[in-house]
Image (cartoon, rainbow, N blue to C red):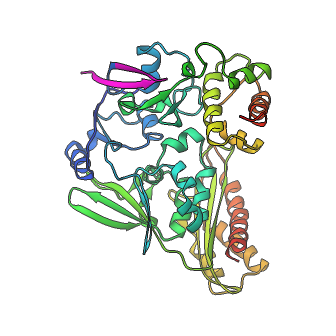
Amino acid sequence: MKRLIQLNVNGELYEVAVHEHRTLSEVLREELDLIGTKEACNQGDCGSCTVILDGKTVTACLTLAVEADGREVRTIEGISDGGELNPLQKVFVEHGAIQCGFCTPGMVMSATALLEDNPKPTEDEVRMGIAGNICRCTGYTKIVEAILALSEGGK
Amino acid sequence: MRLPEFKYLSPETVQEACSLLAQHGDKAKVLAGGTDVMNVMKDRVISPEFVVGLRGITDLDYINDDSDGIKIGALTTLATLMKSSVIKEKLPSLAEVPTKMATTQIRNMGTVVGNICNAAPSADMAPILICMGAQAKITGPDGDRVVALEDFFTGPGQTVLGAGEIMTEIQVPNQPTNSAGAYFKLSRVSVDLAVVGVGVVLAMDGDTCKDIKITLASVAPKPIRAPKAEASIKGKKIDEALIEEAGKIASGEATPIDDVRGSAFYRTEIVNVFTKRAIRHALEQAK
């Protein structure tokens, strides 16, 4: 028996019937077609499924959809301002912080939350802030540089 | 792997949660932050028919500063603990522990009580809390009881929780004046479990150590105290020779095994190193 839940995703209200054992990442991707949020390890280690839930980053693969009922979800689709890349996304592109791009949505969500919480992080704070997002391509250097460049540029 | 099918129950009170767990026995599993339980279910280690979510219970997410100590509610996340101004001011060595655990995302979801109840021998929250003399308030269908955290663990993943029982609160008694602590953790990468964990809390009276507690994680089936090492320091003036000796004694009290994360030999060596470091660090803070 499915349960009807309400998800506020990127400011839009969705009503969706879900099985109680579905995760938020599965529902975002398979029911709402929001496939920007990725599933890689599916056990909360890689961070590719990172979304912002009620203002805090979580791994959507370890979150039950029914436990997100009535709450605010921000995904990568909500980051770009009506289709144009936002400043964080632009600085990622400018600094070569993206190679295959698979970690990027989760990385951008973590960086977004980090900068909202701490607009001028030190390099150590940036590294700690993205420690939950694994990147197999870049070696993190350009990602850290991009985030620091944006924060030093002021907001 | 996807989660097995289950029915999600959302009790609104602790009593309701306890009676649901008692009613369904082995067929039910309690869920708080989910950072351990979700993976255990995905790996099919357990496949409960009912998942009893605690999220719906209001007033389980709190850090209260009472006259007799600090009380941490069952739904308090690791992130909340490390950012809490009360904890940073009154129990700074406790506030530091989550900064050595996992990732931002996991700390936003996982709970302090959950880390304890998961009862891994490496449980990061255990050493400092045990050193501080913390107690666990356990609520069941027949009411409440209080158990010293030190006595809560019975083996890897095993605790004294009975049918229908939930840990609802961790109680940390007021610490003596001039006391301080330190937790040292060895891990393969920054976000990993502890290969060795050592927590020390000591209380000074001038140059003399009034009291000291040393707790070791990941070197026995559960977190253990190091009473011989403690006895070698308690009541004495702490100097380098005493610290060196305490490190050796503590490493003799550890009973680690070889596993994928480290060898018994290496873990024993690190207990020695970390015990000394933690004592020195705590001593610095206690001044």
B44 vs B24, left or right, is: right
Residue under the point 62% across and 43% down: B192
Q: Position of residue B205 (x, y in %)?
A: 64, 86
Compared with B153, A16 (above or below) is: above
A135 vs A18, left or right, is: right
Residue A124 seen anywhere in this rendered image of the structure: yes
Q: Position of residue A89 (x, y in %)?
A: 69, 22
Magenta residue check for B54: no
Magenta residue check for A5: yes
Residue under the point 63% across and 72% down: B180
The image quadrant of residue A36 is top right
Tell which of B215 and A153 is nearer to you: A153
Which region is colored magenta? Answer: A1-15
The image quadrant of residue B281 is bottom right
Tell which of B286 and B252 is nearer to you: B286
Q: Position of residue A56 (x, y in %)?
A: 53, 38
Tell which of B228 and B239 is nearer to you: B239
How many labels were placed on the picture?
A: 0
Image quadrant containing the C terminus of chain B: bottom right
Residue under the point 49% across and 15% down: A34
B2 vs B91, left or right, is: left
Q: Position of residue A58 (x, y in %)?
A: 52, 35
B263 vs B62, left or right, is: right
Most extreme residue toward the front is: A155
Residue A22 seen anywhere in this rendered image of the structure: no
Compared with B227, B207 (above or below) is: below
Dominant secondary structure (helix, strand or loop) of the stretch shown in magenta: strand
Compared with B150, A38 (above or below) is: above
The image quadrant of residue A95 is top right
